[in-house]
Image (cartoon, rainbow, N blue to C red):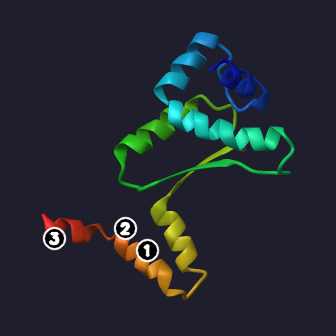
């Protein structure tokens, strides 16, 4: 993980400069951090002119909401990280297309009333 720590310093996306605090954050929120760093690699290698990492999650997932709040506290800004809910993205897509696939997606993945009926 030393190479990821070095990349994180070059990426300049993190508020904390205390190495022990940074390592604690990286352990607790490791998957989010690693995914964020993957986005940063592409920007740092000039593969893209602009970009950011999006954490996409169901709005009622309390664990994801907590992880996002904790992770966001470690960031120096919001220009390399965004958190969007599946519901927000599906609504935005639906407002821009009449394609049937988005209705099928919403029904399959976001119609939680079906789950309540099944139990």
Query: Do we see residue 72 in this rendering?
Result: no
> Is 18 situated above or below 76?
above
| Residue name at image x 22 percent, y 66 percent | 115
Badge 3 element:
helix
Is the Cβ of the residue at disc 1 closer than 8 Å to that at disc 2? yes
Query: Closer to the observer: label 3 or label 1?
Result: 1
Other residues around mark 1 within 10 Å, as few (<14) / some (14–19) / many (≥20): few
Q: Is 70 in front, or is 27?
A: 27
Name which of mark 3 and mark 1 comes first in the sequence: 1
How far across and down, in percent of the image, does residue 41 sit? Answer: 75, 38
Image-based side of 19 in relation to 61, left or right:
right
Camera sees residue 40? yes
- Residues 82 and 114: in front is 114
Q: Quadrant of the N terminus?
A: top right
**Are the two marked residues, 2 and 3, in contact with CB atoms closer than 8 angstroms?**
no
Circle 2 SS class: helix
Question: From the viewer's perspective, is 69 left or right of 6?
Answer: left
Q: Which mark is residue 74?
A: none
Q: Where is 54 relative to 89, above or below?
A: above
Q: Residue furthest left?
A: 119
Image: 76 above or below 52: above
Res 105 label: 1
Across and down, in percent, residue 26 comes to: 55, 24
Pinpoint residue 6: horizontal percent, then vertical percent: 73, 21
Q: List the residue tagged with mark 3.
A: 117
Q: Which residue is mark 2?
A: 110
The quarter of the picture where the C terminus appears is: bottom left
Tell me which numbered mark, 2 or 3, is placed earlier along the sequence. Answer: 2
Cα distance between the residues tagged 2 and 3: 14 Å
**C-alpha distance separating marks 3 and 1:** 19 Å
Looking at the rendered image, the disc whose residue lies closer to the viewer, 1 or 2, is 1
């Amino acid at each position: 993980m030393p190479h990821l720590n070095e990349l994180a310093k070059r990426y300049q996306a993190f508020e904390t400069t205390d190495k022990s605090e940074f390592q604690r954050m990286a352990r607790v929120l490791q998957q989010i951090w690693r995914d964020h760093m993957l986005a940063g690699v592409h920007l740092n290698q000039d593969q893209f002119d602009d970009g950011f990492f999006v954490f996409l999650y169901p709005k009622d997932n309390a664990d994801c909401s907590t992880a996002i709040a904790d992770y966001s506290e470690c960031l120096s800004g919001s220009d390399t990280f965004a958190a969007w809910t599946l519901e927000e993205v599906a609504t935005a897509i639906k407002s821009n297309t009449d394609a049937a696939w988005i209705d099928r997606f919403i029904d399959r993945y976001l119609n939680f009333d079906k789950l309540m009926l099944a139990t």
